[in-house]
Image (spheres, helix red, strand yellow):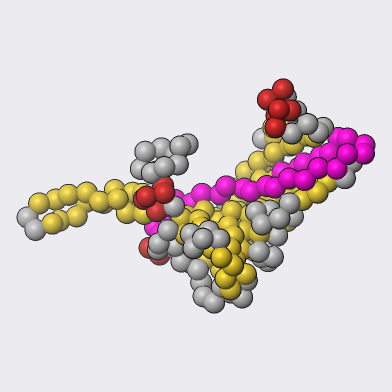
Amino acid sequence: MTTGLTPTPETDALAKFPWSLTYTITLAGHQITTDLLVKNTSTDTPFAFQALLHTYFAAPASSVAIGPLTGLTYIDKVGGGVERKETRELVDVRTYTDAVYKDASGHYSVRWSGGGADIKTIGFKDVVVWNPNKDAGSKIGDMNEGGWCVLDRFRVSTRLTWRCRDNFVCVEPGTASYFVTLDGSSEWRGQQVITAL
C-alpha cells in the first residue's frame, strides 16, 4: 500500500516550501516494511525536517529486552533531557522510559516473554525507546482506553480484582536528535523492516 502527501493550504500555513512525501507499507508472511520518501520539489530552496516511525509493540513490559544499544549516547527525556551513556547490555522498559539513542546501528533486537522482533533500518541515525507506563499512557489522545496495558485478574485476600499490567513498548527509528536538510530537487529515504519471530 502506498499513499502520498503534497502541500495543502493547512500545511502551507505551517511551512511554505514545496515538498512531497510518499509512505509505502509492504506486508509479507512474517515481515512488514515501511518506507518514507521525502522530496524537495523546489529547484533551489532547501528545507529541513525530522521523521520518526512510531512502531508500537504489544508486549509485556516486565520482560522486554532491547539491544544492541550498549555504549551509545542517549537523551534521557524522562530525566530532564540529560545525555547519558548506555551501559546495559539489554535495555528494559520496566519503568517509564523515553530515550533517544543517537548514532545507532540500524539493527535492533526486541525480545519479550513469548515473542519478539528484529528491526533493520536505512536512513535513520536514531532510535527511540519509549514506554509511557500508565501515567503517561493514559494521556495519549489517539490510543484506545487502556491500550498501554492488559488487564489481569488476581486474588487479594479472599476476593478477585483486576490490575493493569503494562503491555506496551515502542522502538522507533527516526531523526529525533537532528534535522535532515534537503537541497532543491533532492530526496531522502528512510526505511524499516520488522521481522516477527
Q: Measured from the top left, where is residue 132 in percent x and y? A: 44, 52
For residue 109, side relative to residue 157 (left or right): right
Nearest the camera: 59 or 100?
Answer: 100
Q: Is residue 181 above or below residue 69?
A: above
Q: Is residue 13 above or below residue 157?
A: above
Q: Quadrant of residue 121?
A: bottom right
Please identify the residue farthest to the right as the structure is shown. 43
Q: Which quadrant holds the N terminus?
A: top right
Q: Is residue 150 above or below residue 2?
A: below
Residue 83 can be seen in this image: yes
Q: Is residue 197 above or below residue 1?
A: below
> Residue at the location (66% across, 64% down)?
102
For residue 43, side relative to residue 165 (left or right): right
Region in magenta? 36-61
Instruction: Judge whether residue 26 is colored magenta.
Output: no
Nearest the camera: 128 or 17?
Answer: 17
Nearest the camera: 85 or 187?
Answer: 85
For residue 84, side relative to residue 175 (left or right): left
How many marks can you see? 0
For residue 175, side relative to residue 56 (left or right): right
> Residue at the location (56% across, 65% down)?
82
Q: Measured from the top left, where is residue 23 in percent x and y? A: 70, 38
> Residue at the location (64% across, 48% down)?
52
Please identify the residue farthest to the top as the structure is shown. 9
Instruction: Judge whether residue 56 is colored magenta.
Output: yes
Please identify the residue farthest to the left as the structure is shown. 158
Residue 108 can be seen in this image: no
> Residue at the location (38% across, 44% down)?
138
Nearest the camera: 111 or 14?
Answer: 14
Q: Measured from the top left, where is residue 124 in percent x and y? A: 70, 56
